């Protein structure tokens, strides 16, 4: 029984999506290395904060979607522990706020490097983790989920991770933060593309429901291309081999995933979600590696 419960909680964390959090920190570290301001301690704390905040958001999404009647047993996506009766709603609610509290405590330690204004940023992030699934206007249920991902998994982690290392934020970093956000949004697009029929049936107005699967799939392709284009300024400072291998490798793999998305249905789409997240992390780590080698 204990092993089963552990597996249920691990599934609720949605491990296949966690590379999205780590990618933002890795990309910021790449910029910091390139600019000669990398600092390991705040970077590591940013990574811990990002992962904890995403897990808290995932827990909140499962709890609040259940209480709103938006999840159904036997759905196409990964098993939802609360909906299937594996985890009690009360336990999930406690875990949500406990994890969010741990994330806030981790984030508070970053004040030593970034100043007390980071407390305001932390409150904004904590509220965003909840606003995605609950509140007077839940973002995920009203077609704003992808925008939220760009902000909270792209702009915020990249810019803040770079800031606590350098004390500033450059235009190139800002562009890179949007790029990472667009890659992260693609993970959600895959999720909502798969769940389009289920979401429509319960009145969950995701972007895929509002615009249809063809538009969502086209946006997936465009996001990846624009993301690479936004990072071009930084790639120009690196050797030609790096410029070719990482960006082109990403675009080839991204296009392959886009083609596969159009050919799969239901549960067969699930692996593409994890692959999209891993490709995003691979791009960020590739960028970081090239920055280290170059500098």
Image (spheres, helix red, strand yellow):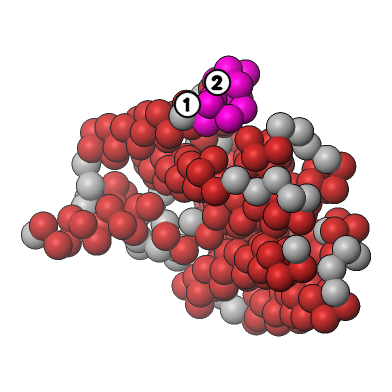
At x 35%, y 52%, the residue is 12
**Quarter of the image where the C terminus is located:** bottom right
Q: Which is more toward the observer, 11 or 122?
A: 122
Position of residue 71 measured from the top left corner of the image (x, y, whole percent): 41, 48
At x 55%, y 20%, the residue is 119
At x 76%, y 33%, the residue is 168
The magenta span reads: 110-119
Tag on residue 182? none
- The secondary element bearing badge 2 is classed as helix
Do tag 2 and tag 1 residues touch (Cβ < 8 Å)?
Answer: yes
- Compared across the picture, whether 266 is left or right of 65 comes to right
Position of residue 160 measured from the top left corner of the image (x, y, whole percent): 65, 37
Q: Which is more toward the observer, 24 or 130?
A: 24
Tag on residue 119? 2
Q: In the image, is residue 251 above or below residue 189?
A: below
Residue 84, quarter of picture: bottom left
Mark sitting earlier along the chain (2/1): 1
Q: Where does label 1 land, which residue?
A: 108
> Callout 2: few (<14), some (14-19), or many (20+) C-alpha neighbours within 10 Å?
some
**Quarter of the image where the N terminus is located:** bottom left
């Amino acid at each position: 029984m204990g092993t089963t419960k552990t597996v249920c909680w691990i599934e609720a964390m949605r491990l296949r999506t966690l590379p999205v959090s780590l990618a933002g920190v890795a990309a910021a570290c790449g910029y910091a290395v390139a600019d000669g301001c990398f600092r390991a301690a705040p970077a590591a704390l940013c990574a811990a904060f990002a992962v904890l905040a995403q897990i808290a958001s995932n827990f909140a999404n499962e709890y609040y979607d259940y209480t709103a009647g938006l999840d159904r047993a036997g759905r196409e996506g990964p098993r939802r522990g609360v909906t299937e009766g594996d985890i009690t709603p009360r336990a999930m609610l406690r875990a949500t706020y406990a994890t969010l509290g741990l994330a806030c405590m981790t984030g508070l330690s970053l004040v030593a490097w970034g100043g007390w204004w980071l407390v305001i940023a932390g409150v904004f992030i904590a509220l965003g983790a909840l606003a995605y699934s609950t509140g007077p206007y839940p973002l995920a249920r009203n077609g704003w989920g992808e925008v939220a991902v760009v902000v909270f998994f792209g702009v915020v982690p990249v810019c803040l991770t770079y800031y606590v290392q350098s004390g500033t934020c450059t235009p190139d970093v800002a562009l890179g933060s949007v790029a990472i956000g667009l890659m992260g949004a693609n993970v959600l697009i895959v999720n909502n593309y798969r769940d389009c029929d289920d979401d429509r049936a319960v009145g969950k107005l995701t972007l895929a429901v509002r615009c249809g699967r063809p538009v969502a799939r086209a946006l997936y392709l465009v996001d990846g291309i624009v993301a690479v284009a936004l990072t071009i300024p930084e790639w120009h400072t690196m050797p030609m081999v790096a410029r070719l291998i990482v960006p082109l490798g990403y675009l080839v793999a991204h296009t392959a995933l886009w083609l596969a998305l159009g050919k799969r249905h239901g549960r067969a789409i699930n692996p593409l979600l994890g692959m999209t997240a891993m490709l995003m992390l691979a791009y960020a780590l590739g960028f970081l590696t090239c920055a280290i080698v170059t500098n």
